[in-house]
Each structure stands twice: as C-alpha cells, then as structure tokens.
Image (tube, rainbow, N blue to C red):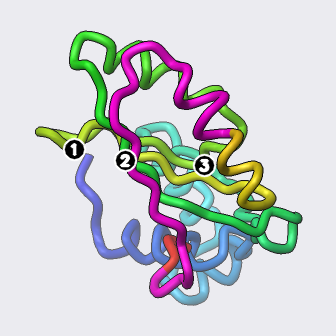
Amino acid sequence: MTLDHIDEKIISMLQDDGRRSYSEIADAAERTEVTIRRRVKRLIDEGYIKKFTVILDPMKMGRKIRAVIRVKTVMKEATVISKKVQHFSEVDEAYFLDGACGIMLKVTVDDLANLREFLELKLGKVPGVGEIETCIVLEDIKPPY
C-alpha cells in the first residue's frame, strides 16, 4: 500500500496529538468519520502506525539527568550487548550503529550518582563492552515529540 495525502494528513494529525478524535480528523481531511476509522485501522494493520503511546516528561517524573552514551563493542559480542541493554530501566532508546560507532544509548537517571552506578555496575559489567563515552544533555533543542 502507498500512502496518499489523506493518509499523510491522518498520520500528521495523530503524531501531533494521538488523542485527537476521529471526527476532528474527518473535518480537517474533509472525509467522513467512518472513512477515517477505516483508514486508521488499515494504517495500524499494515504496520505504518506501530502503537499509540504517552510520552512522559522525565524531569517531572523525578529523573533529572539525561545522557547520550556511545558504547564501543567487541564485534562478536555486539548482538548480545544489544539484547542486554534493552532490559536496563535507565535506557530510553538504543541503536546499533554502522561502522566504528558501536551502540548509542539514550538514558535517563535520577542524578549523577545513579548515572555513575549505571555506567559502572550495569553497562560496564556487560561482557564485550569496551570504551564508553558519555555526554550529558544540557538542553533539548528539538525533542522527538
């Protein structure tokens, strides 16, 4: 299936506000609510829309430190490391990157002591983890939401 301008309008409006009503989307797209419901269902069924979710503000949830961490790995251990970091509660996002970049993690923790604990007692103890480079986020310039 290819997306047409109506599908793109639906996706754009839901990305802006996932709680937006079908009737509001229908009005904006100049279609019926039934049509919008069918299209959203199709977009879900075909995998364009993976899920609807809530994005929390980690700062309001008590977590005050965010960091981007680059992990150099022993190549033969990269897949095992990738699977392991998925289960760390501190990890918000994880990416296996091409070339010498290794694995990039976006983490959120309560404070610097928790960041150090995560780096030393969790991440640093995973077999195959080599050099770890940590950059603390000072300000959101363009957040993903």
Residue 53: give x, y in percent of width and height. 70, 55
Q: Earlier in the sequence, mark 2 or mark 3?
A: 2
CB atoms at circles 3 and 1 under 8 Å apart? Answer: no
The secondary element bearing badge 2 is classed as: strand
Q: Earlier in the sequence, mark 1 or mark 2?
A: 2
At label 2, counting other C-alpha atoms closer than 10 Å, the crowd grade (few under 14, some 14-19, many 20 or more) is: many
Residue at the spot of label 3: 92
In the image, residue 94 sits, relative to residue 135, either above or below, namely: above
Q: What residue do we see at 61% from left, 43% from top?
A: 91
CB atoms at circles 1 and 2 under 8 Å apart? Answer: yes
Q: Is 125 included in the stretch rendered in magenta?
A: yes
Q: Amino acid at mark 1?
A: Cys
Q: What residue do we see at 51% from left, 77% from top?
A: 143
Q: Nearer the viewer, residue 8 or 122?
A: 122
In which quadrant will I find the C terminus?
bottom right
CB atoms at circles 2 and 3 under 8 Å apart? Answer: no
Q: Determine which of the numbered discs, if any, sits on residue 70 in the image.
A: 2
Q: Which stretch did the figure color magenta?
A: 118-142
14 with respect to 55 (left or right) = left
Q: CA distance from mark 1 to mark 2?
A: 7 Å
Q: What residue do we see at 48% from left, 20% from top?
A: 83
The secondary element bearing badge 3 is classed as: strand
Residue at the spot of label 1: 101
Foreground mark, 2 or 3, reads: 2
Q: Is 132 included in the stretch rendered in magenta?
A: yes
